[in-house]
Image (cartoon, grey):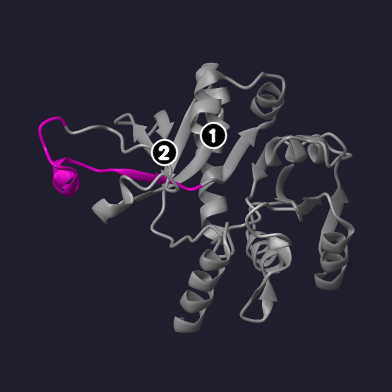
Amino acid sequence: MIVGIIPARYAATRLPGKPLVDLEGQTMIERVWRAASACAALDAVIIATDDERIVAEARRIGAQAVITDPALPSGTDRCHAVAMTLPIEPKIVINIQGDEPLLQPDVLADLVEALDKGTADVATPVSRITDWMDLPDPNIVKVALTAEGRAVYFSRSPIPHQRGASIETWLDHGAYWKHIGIYAYRLDALKRHVGLLPTRLEQSEMLEQLRLLSDGATFDCVETSAHYISVDTPEDADRVRQYLKAL
Protein backbone atom coordinates (compact mmCIF):
# COMPACT_ATOMS: atom_id res chain seq x y z
CA MET A 1 0.00 0.00 0.00
CA ILE A 2 1.22 3.48 -0.89
CA VAL A 3 -0.47 6.31 0.97
CA GLY A 4 -0.24 10.09 0.71
CA ILE A 5 -0.85 11.96 3.96
CA ILE A 6 -1.43 15.72 4.04
CA PRO A 7 -0.65 17.31 7.42
CA ALA A 8 -2.83 20.40 7.83
CA ARG A 9 -2.55 22.51 10.99
CA TYR A 10 -5.14 25.20 11.52
CA ALA A 11 -3.11 27.30 13.94
CA ALA A 12 -0.26 28.38 11.65
CA THR A 13 1.66 31.25 13.27
CA ARG A 14 2.05 33.53 10.25
CA LEU A 15 -1.23 32.65 8.53
CA PRO A 16 -3.88 31.32 10.96
CA GLY A 17 -6.40 29.04 9.28
CA LYS A 18 -3.98 28.55 6.40
CA PRO A 19 -5.48 25.31 5.00
CA LEU A 20 -8.83 27.07 4.54
CA VAL A 21 -7.50 30.14 2.75
CA ASP A 22 -9.34 30.68 -0.53
CA LEU A 23 -7.16 30.46 -3.63
CA GLU A 24 -9.23 31.41 -6.66
CA GLY A 25 -12.34 29.49 -5.69
CA GLN A 26 -10.81 26.53 -3.86
CA THR A 27 -9.36 26.29 -0.38
CA MET A 28 -5.68 25.49 -0.17
CA ILE A 29 -6.33 22.06 1.34
CA GLU A 30 -8.77 21.28 -1.48
CA ARG A 31 -6.16 22.14 -4.12
CA VAL A 32 -3.52 19.97 -2.45
CA TRP A 33 -5.92 17.06 -1.91
CA ARG A 34 -7.27 17.13 -5.48
CA ALA A 35 -3.76 17.15 -6.92
CA ALA A 36 -2.63 14.29 -4.69
CA SER A 37 -5.79 12.30 -5.45
CA ALA A 38 -5.04 12.60 -9.18
CA CYS A 39 -1.82 10.57 -8.71
CA ALA A 40 -2.53 7.00 -9.80
CA ALA A 41 0.48 5.72 -7.83
CA LEU A 42 -1.29 6.40 -4.53
CA ASP A 43 -3.74 3.92 -3.04
CA ALA A 44 -5.14 6.47 -0.58
CA VAL A 45 -4.86 10.16 0.30
CA ILE A 46 -5.64 11.21 3.88
CA ILE A 47 -5.70 14.63 5.52
CA ALA A 48 -4.13 14.67 9.00
CA THR A 49 -5.34 17.65 11.00
CA ASP A 50 -5.74 19.10 14.47
CA ASP A 51 -8.98 20.98 13.92
CA GLU A 52 -12.63 20.13 13.29
CA ARG A 53 -12.94 23.02 10.83
CA ILE A 54 -10.53 21.27 8.51
CA VAL A 55 -12.39 17.99 9.03
CA ALA A 56 -15.58 19.79 7.96
CA GLU A 57 -13.85 21.05 4.82
CA ALA A 58 -12.59 17.54 4.10
CA ARG A 59 -16.14 16.23 4.31
CA ARG A 60 -17.32 18.96 1.97
CA ILE A 61 -14.85 17.99 -0.74
CA GLY A 62 -15.18 14.24 -0.18
CA ALA A 63 -11.78 13.70 1.40
CA GLN A 64 -10.83 11.38 4.23
CA ALA A 65 -9.55 13.20 7.31
CA VAL A 66 -8.13 12.03 10.63
CA ILE A 67 -7.80 14.12 13.79
CA THR A 68 -4.32 13.78 15.24
CA ASP A 69 -2.99 14.84 18.63
CA PRO A 70 -2.44 18.63 18.60
CA ALA A 71 0.66 18.10 20.74
CA LEU A 72 2.50 16.26 17.96
CA PRO A 73 5.54 18.39 17.11
CA SER A 74 5.60 18.13 13.31
CA GLY A 75 3.83 17.12 10.14
CA THR A 76 6.07 14.06 9.95
CA ASP A 77 4.85 12.95 13.36
CA ARG A 78 1.25 13.42 12.19
CA CYS A 79 1.96 11.32 9.09
CA HIS A 80 3.40 8.56 11.25
CA ALA A 81 0.43 8.67 13.64
CA VAL A 82 -2.03 8.25 10.76
CA ALA A 83 0.05 5.55 9.04
CA MET A 84 0.03 3.49 12.23
CA THR A 85 -3.78 3.45 12.29
CA LEU A 86 -4.23 2.04 8.79
CA PRO A 87 -5.64 -1.49 8.49
CA ILE A 88 -2.94 -2.40 5.95
CA GLU A 89 0.64 -1.44 6.75
CA PRO A 90 1.82 0.94 4.01
CA LYS A 91 5.01 0.25 2.09
CA ILE A 92 5.56 3.94 1.29
CA VAL A 93 4.18 7.01 3.08
CA ILE A 94 4.36 10.36 1.29
CA ASN A 95 4.32 13.43 3.50
CA ILE A 96 2.53 15.93 1.23
CA GLN A 97 2.83 19.43 2.60
CA GLY A 98 -0.58 21.05 3.02
CA ASP A 99 0.84 24.43 2.01
CA GLU A 100 1.86 23.42 -1.54
CA PRO A 101 -1.28 24.36 -3.54
CA LEU A 102 0.54 24.07 -6.88
CA LEU A 103 1.35 20.40 -6.29
CA GLN A 104 1.66 18.30 -9.45
CA PRO A 105 0.54 14.63 -9.35
CA ASP A 106 3.45 13.56 -11.56
CA VAL A 107 5.92 14.66 -8.90
CA LEU A 108 4.41 12.21 -6.40
CA ALA A 109 4.54 9.40 -8.97
CA ASP A 110 8.21 10.18 -9.64
CA LEU A 111 9.00 9.88 -5.92
CA VAL A 112 7.30 6.49 -5.70
CA GLU A 113 9.20 5.32 -8.77
CA ALA A 114 12.51 6.48 -7.26
CA LEU A 115 11.95 4.35 -4.16
CA ASP A 116 10.69 1.37 -6.18
CA LYS A 117 13.76 1.40 -8.42
CA GLY A 118 16.38 2.51 -5.90
CA THR A 119 17.69 1.81 -2.44
CA ALA A 120 17.29 5.18 -0.71
CA ASP A 121 15.33 5.55 2.52
CA VAL A 122 13.56 8.71 1.35
CA ALA A 123 12.83 10.35 -2.00
CA THR A 124 12.20 14.09 -2.23
CA PRO A 125 11.88 16.60 -5.11
CA VAL A 126 14.28 19.37 -6.05
CA SER A 127 14.25 22.04 -8.74
CA ARG A 128 17.17 23.86 -10.30
CA ILE A 129 17.74 27.41 -9.07
CA THR A 130 17.88 29.84 -11.98
CA ASP A 131 17.92 33.21 -10.16
CA TRP A 132 21.01 33.95 -8.08
CA MET A 133 18.89 36.05 -5.69
CA ASP A 134 17.30 32.83 -4.44
CA LEU A 135 20.68 31.66 -3.12
CA PRO A 136 20.93 33.92 -0.03
CA ASP A 137 17.18 33.72 0.72
CA PRO A 138 16.84 31.67 3.96
CA ASN A 139 13.23 30.82 3.13
CA ILE A 140 14.45 28.83 0.12
CA VAL A 141 16.06 25.61 1.29
CA LYS A 142 19.07 24.56 -0.72
CA VAL A 143 20.50 21.06 -1.04
CA ALA A 144 23.95 19.89 -2.09
CA LEU A 145 23.88 16.70 -4.15
CA THR A 146 26.24 13.93 -5.11
CA ALA A 147 26.72 13.18 -8.80
CA GLU A 148 24.09 10.43 -8.38
CA GLY A 149 21.50 12.86 -6.99
CA ARG A 150 21.73 11.92 -3.33
CA ALA A 151 21.47 14.63 -0.70
CA VAL A 152 24.70 15.53 1.08
CA TYR A 153 23.25 18.37 3.14
CA PHE A 154 20.21 20.67 3.30
CA SER A 155 20.66 24.29 4.33
CA ARG A 156 19.04 27.68 4.38
CA SER A 157 22.44 29.05 3.38
CA PRO A 158 23.68 28.93 -0.22
CA ILE A 159 25.57 25.67 -0.75
CA PRO A 160 28.06 24.82 -2.10
CA HIS A 161 30.10 27.97 -1.52
CA GLN A 162 32.07 29.29 -4.51
CA ARG A 163 35.32 30.55 -3.05
CA GLY A 164 36.72 33.65 -4.72
CA ALA A 165 33.57 34.39 -6.76
CA SER A 166 30.81 36.91 -6.09
CA ILE A 167 27.48 35.28 -5.36
CA GLU A 168 25.95 36.92 -8.44
CA THR A 169 28.09 34.59 -10.58
CA TRP A 170 27.72 31.35 -8.62
CA LEU A 171 25.14 29.86 -10.99
CA ASP A 172 27.76 30.09 -13.74
CA HIS A 173 29.92 27.60 -11.86
CA GLY A 174 27.44 24.72 -11.66
CA ALA A 175 23.94 23.64 -10.66
CA TYR A 176 22.28 24.81 -7.46
CA TRP A 177 19.18 23.08 -6.15
CA LYS A 178 16.07 24.21 -4.31
CA HIS A 179 14.48 21.63 -2.06
CA ILE A 180 10.70 21.13 -2.22
CA GLY A 181 9.40 19.86 1.11
CA ILE A 182 7.60 16.68 0.06
CA TYR A 183 8.95 13.35 1.33
CA ALA A 184 8.29 9.79 0.24
CA TYR A 185 9.37 7.55 3.12
CA ARG A 186 9.81 3.84 3.26
CA LEU A 187 7.81 2.91 6.34
CA ASP A 188 10.91 1.84 8.30
CA ALA A 189 12.51 5.23 7.58
CA LEU A 190 9.42 7.09 8.81
CA LYS A 191 9.40 5.03 12.02
CA ARG A 192 13.13 5.68 12.40
CA HIS A 193 12.62 9.44 12.01
CA VAL A 194 10.01 9.79 14.75
CA GLY A 195 12.10 7.64 17.09
CA LEU A 196 15.08 10.01 16.89
CA LEU A 197 15.68 13.09 19.01
CA PRO A 198 16.14 16.45 17.25
CA THR A 199 19.79 17.10 16.39
CA ARG A 200 21.90 20.21 16.78
CA LEU A 201 21.99 20.67 13.01
CA GLU A 202 18.21 20.35 12.75
CA GLN A 203 17.68 22.91 15.50
CA SER A 204 20.23 25.28 14.00
CA GLU A 205 18.75 25.23 10.49
CA MET A 206 15.15 24.51 11.59
CA LEU A 207 15.03 21.70 9.00
CA GLU A 208 13.67 18.43 10.33
CA GLN A 209 15.05 16.34 7.44
CA LEU A 210 18.51 16.87 8.92
CA ARG A 211 17.53 14.60 11.84
CA LEU A 212 17.27 11.54 9.62
CA LEU A 213 20.14 12.60 7.35
CA SER A 214 22.42 12.99 10.37
CA ASP A 215 21.50 9.45 11.41
CA GLY A 216 22.85 8.10 8.12
CA ALA A 217 19.63 7.82 6.11
CA THR A 218 19.85 8.29 2.35
CA PHE A 219 17.75 10.79 0.41
CA ASP A 220 17.32 10.44 -3.35
CA CYS A 221 16.53 13.86 -4.83
CA VAL A 222 14.26 13.79 -7.87
CA GLU A 223 14.47 16.74 -10.24
CA THR A 224 11.27 18.48 -11.26
CA SER A 225 10.59 21.54 -13.39
CA ALA A 226 7.16 22.04 -11.79
CA HIS A 227 6.56 25.51 -10.35
CA TYR A 228 5.93 25.59 -6.60
CA ILE A 229 5.01 28.41 -4.24
CA SER A 230 4.85 27.34 -0.60
CA VAL A 231 2.31 29.37 1.35
CA ASP A 232 3.48 30.62 4.75
CA THR A 233 2.24 34.22 4.69
CA PRO A 234 -0.62 36.28 3.22
CA GLU A 235 1.86 37.56 0.64
CA ASP A 236 2.60 33.98 -0.47
CA ALA A 237 -1.13 33.35 -0.87
CA ASP A 238 -1.38 36.44 -3.07
CA ARG A 239 1.48 35.15 -5.23
CA VAL A 240 -0.39 31.87 -5.73
CA ARG A 241 -3.58 33.74 -6.67
CA GLN A 242 -1.71 35.79 -9.25
CA TYR A 243 -0.11 32.63 -10.66
CA LEU A 244 -3.49 30.88 -10.93
CA LYS A 245 -5.08 33.89 -12.59
CA ALA A 246 -2.35 33.85 -15.22
CA LEU A 247 -2.91 30.21 -16.17
| Classed neighbour count for the residue bearing mark 2: other residues with Cα under 10 Å, few (<14), some (14–19), many (≥20) | many
Instruction: Inspect the image, locate mark 2, and give the three-letter code of the amino acid beneath it.
Output: Arg
Q: How far across and down, in percent of the image, does residue 209 sit?
A: 55, 31
Q: CA distance from mark 1 to mark 2?
A: 9 Å
| Classed neighbour count for the residue bearing mark 1: other residues with Cα under 10 Å, few (<14), some (14–19), many (≥20) | some
Report if the CB atoms under discs 1 and 2 are less than 8 Å apart.
yes
Whether residue 192 sits left or right of residue 169 in the image: it is: right
Question: What quarter of the picture does the N terminus occupy?
Answer: top right
Query: Is 234 placed above or below 131 here?
Result: below
Of 1 and 33, nearer the camera is 33
Q: How far across and down, in percent of the image, does residue 187 sit?
A: 70, 30
Which numbered circle lies on residue 10? none
Residue drawn at point x = 74 percent, y = 62 percent:
17
Instruction: Inspect the image, locate mark 1, and give the three-letter code of the amino acid beneath it.
Output: Met
Residue drawn at point x = 50 percent, y = 35 percent:
117
Q: Secondary structure at mark 1?
A: loop
Query: Where does label 2 land, which residue?
Result: 156
**What's the magenta region?**
163-180
Query: Where does label 1 land, which residue?
Result: 206
Q: How far across and down, in percent of the image, does residue 165 sit?
A: 11, 38
Classify residue 51 by image quadrant.
Answer: bottom right
Q: Secondary structure at mark 2?
A: loop
Residue drawn at point x = 19 percent, y = 41 percent:
174
Query: Is 177 placed above or below 19 here?
Result: above
Judged from this view, the residue extending furthest toward the front is 14
Residue drawn at point x = 58 percent, y = 66 percent:
234
